[in-house]
C-alpha cells in the first residue's frame, strides 16, 4: 500500500479486460489494491477531518479512475464500464478486504443523480451534469425540512415560476455534504393548491447561487456532515426542472430507491469483513467475551442477520439488472440493514464495557468501523435517513404483507 505522497497510482487497464473471468478479475483487482490503497488515509482524517474529508476521497476517486472503476455501475453511454451485479459485488468485497477509503461524499453524484437522470432527465441535463459528476463534482440532496422529514409530502419550500426561471424560498435540513457540494437535488412545492403529493417538483440548484446559505450541524458523533440550507429568492432556470412540473414525488422515488440499493451493498460488504476480522480473533483465542453464552448468541444472531441482508441485497440488484423493476424491496433492505447495524454496534459497546466509553473521532462511512461508541451513536442516523424505520414498517406491512392501512 502507498503513503499519500503525491505519487500517482499505477494504472492497470488490464483489470477491466478480465471482466469475463471473475476469479482472474478479482485477483488482479486485489493485487492492484494491495499496492495502491493509501496506508495513511484514516490517520489523515483523524488529524484534520474537515480538510481531509474532501481530499482523501478526491485522491481515491482519481486512483480508481486509472483502472476504470470510479463508477463501475454506470452504463457505457455515461462513461462507465457497465459491469454486471456479480462483478460489482466482487469489487465492493475487495474494497472492504483492502480497507480502502470510502466515497461517501460522491454517493449522490454517483448513485442518486444518475438513477434520477436515467429515468427523468433530459438529454441536455445528462450531457451537462453526468461527465462532471463522474469526475468528482459533488452533489447533495435537498428533501427534508424542519416540518417535513418522515412526512416528506408536507414540505413547504416554494418554487414560483417567473418567466424562464423559478424563484425558490424555504429551508432544508439534514442535507448531507452540502458544505462541500456544488449542486443540489431539491424538492419544492410548485403548486400549493394541488394534493400534497402532486404539487411537488424536483429542481437542480447551484449552491453557489445568490440567496443560498449553508450551516453545518454538529452531531452527537462529533461530525458535521449534515447541514441546514436556507434559500432566499434563489433563481433557478426552468431547464433545471427534472421530470414534469408537479411530478417530483414520482421522480423522488427513483432517487430514494437507489439510496437504499447500491449504498447498502457497499455498507453490508464492509460490515461483513469487520465481522470476519472479529471471527479471526475468536478462532485465535483473543476474544474471551465469546465464552459468554449470551454474548455469543447475540453475536451469532447479528452475523446471521447480516448474511440475510447481503443475500436480499444481491437478489434485489440482480432482479433490477434482469427486469429493470425496483419495487418495494429497497425499503425492506434499508430496514433490515439499519437494525442489524444498530444491534451489532450496541452489542460490542456492551462487550467493551467502561473501556469502550470514549468517542474516538472517525469519519463518515455508513457502516461499523470498530470504534464502537462512535459506531453506535452513528447507527441511529440509519434508522432515520432515507425514510424512518417506523414509516417503512407501515409501508412494508401495507404494500408487501397486505395488512390494513393505518388510520389517517
Image (spheres, rainbow, N blue to C red):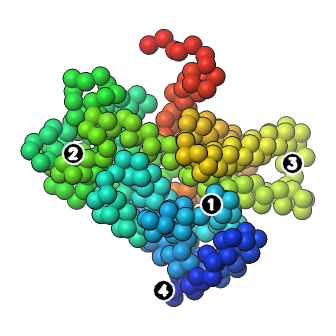
Q: Can you identify the residue that label 2 sits on?
A: 231
Is there CB contact under 8 Å for labels 3 and 4? Answer: no
User: Which residue is pictured at 32% across the width and 57% down the height?
Assistant: 123
Secondary structure of the residue carrying numbered label 3: helix
In this rendering, the answer to whether 147 lies above or below 38 is above
Instruction: Compare marks 3 and 4 and give the one earlier in the sequence.
Output: 4
Name the spot of residue 72 as percent of width and height, x first. 55, 65
Between residue 94 and residue 1, name the one nearer to us.
Answer: 94
Name the spot of residue 336 as percent of width and height, x first. 65, 38
Secondary structure of the residue carrying numbered label 4: loop
The image quarter containing residue 312 is top right
Q: Give the Cα separation between the discs numbered 1 and 4.
A: 33 Å
Residue 6 badge: 4
Instruction: Compare marks 4 and 2 and give the one earlier in the sequence.
Output: 4
Crowding at mark 1 (Cα within 10 Å: few <14, some 14-19, many 20+)? some
Is there CB contact under 8 Å for labels 2 and 3? Answer: no
Q: Give the Cα separation between the discs numbered 3 and 1.
A: 38 Å
Q: Quadrant of the C terminus?
A: top left
Crowding at mark 4 (Cα within 10 Å: few <14, some 14-19, many 20+)? few
Crowding at mark 3 (Cα within 10 Å: few <14, some 14-19, many 20+)? some
Residue 194 relative to residue 66: left or right: left
User: Which residue is pictured at 70% across the width and 78% down the height?
Assistant: 28
Q: Give the Cα separation between the discs numbered 2 and 3.
A: 53 Å
Look at discs 3 and 1 and give the one toward the viewer: 1
Instruction: Compare marks 1 and 2 and give the one earlier in the sequence.
Output: 1
Residue 260 relative to residue 304: left or right: left
Q: Can you identify the residue that label 3 sits on?
A: 290
Amino acid at each position: 500500500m502507498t503513503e499519500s505522497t503525491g505519487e500517482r497510482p499505477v494504472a492497470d487497464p488490464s483489470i477491466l479486460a478480465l471482466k469475463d473471468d471473475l476469479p482472474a478479475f478479482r485477483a488482479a483487482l486485489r493485487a492492484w489494491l494491495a499496492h495502491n490503497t493509501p496506508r495513511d488515509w484514516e490517520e489523515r482524517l483523524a488529524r484534520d477531518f474537515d480538510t481531509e474529508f474532501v481530499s482523501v476521497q478526491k485522491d481515491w476517486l482519481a486512483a480508481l479512475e486509472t483502472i476504470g472503476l470510479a463508477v463501475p455501475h454506470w452504463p457505457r453511454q455515461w462513461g462507465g464500464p457497465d459491469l454486471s451485479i456479480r462483478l460489482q459485488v466482487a469489487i465492493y468485497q475487495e474494497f472492504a478486504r483492502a480497507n480502502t477509503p470510502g466515497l461517501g461524499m460522491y454517493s449522490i453524484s454517483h448513485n442518486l443523480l444518475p438513477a434520477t437522470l436515467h429515468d427523468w432527465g433530459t438529454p441536455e441535463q445528462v450531457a451537462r451534469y453526468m461527465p462532471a459528476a463522474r469526475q468528482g463534482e459533488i452533489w447533495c440532496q435537498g428533501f427534508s425540512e424542519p416540518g417535513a422529514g418522515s412526512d416528506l409530502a408536507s414540505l413547504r419550500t416554494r418554487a414560483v415560476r417567473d418567466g424562464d426561471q423559478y424563484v425558490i424560498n424555504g429551508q432544508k435540513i439534514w442535507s448531507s455534504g452540502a458544505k462541500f457540494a456544488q449542486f443540489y437535488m431539491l424538492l419544492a412545492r410548485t403548486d400549493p393548491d394541488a394534493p400534497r403529493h402532486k404539487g411537488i417538483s424536483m429542481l437542480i440548484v447551484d449552491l453557489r447561487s445568490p440567496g443560498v446559505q449553508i450551516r453545518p450541524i454538529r452531531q452527537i458523533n462529533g461530525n458535521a456532515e449534515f447541514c441546514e440550507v436556507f434559500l432566499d429568492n434563489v433563481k433557478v432556470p426552468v431547464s433545471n426542472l427534472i421530470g414534469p412540473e408537479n411530478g417530483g414525488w414520482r421522480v423522488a422515488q427513483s432517487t430514494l430507491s437507489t439510496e437504499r440499493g447500491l449504498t447498502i451493498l457497499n455498507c453490508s460488504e464492509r460490515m461483513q469483513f469487520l465481522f470476519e476480522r472479529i471471527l479471526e480473533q475468536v478462532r485465535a483465542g483473543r476474544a474471551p467475551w465469546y465464552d459468554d453464552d449470551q454474548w455469543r448468541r447475540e453475536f451469532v444472531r447479528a452475523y446471521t442477520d447480516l448474511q440475510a441482508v447481503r443475500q436480499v441485497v444481491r437478489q434485489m440488484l440482480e432482479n433490477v439488472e434482469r427486469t429493470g423493476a425496483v419495487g418495494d424491496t429497497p425499503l425492506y433492505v434499508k430496514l433490515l440493514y439499519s437494525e442489524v447495524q444498530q444491534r451489532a454496534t450496541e452489542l460490542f459497546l456492551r462487550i467493551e464495557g467502561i473501556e469502550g466509553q470514549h468517542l474516538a473521532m472517525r469519519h463518515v462511512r455508513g457502516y461499523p468501523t470498530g470504534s464502537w461508541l462512535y459506531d453506535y451513536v452513528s447507527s441511529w442516523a440509519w434508522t432515520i435517513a432515507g425514510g424512518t424505520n417506523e414509516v417503512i414498517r407501515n409501508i412494508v406491512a401495507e404494500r408487501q404483507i397486505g395488512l390494513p392501512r393505518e388510520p389517517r
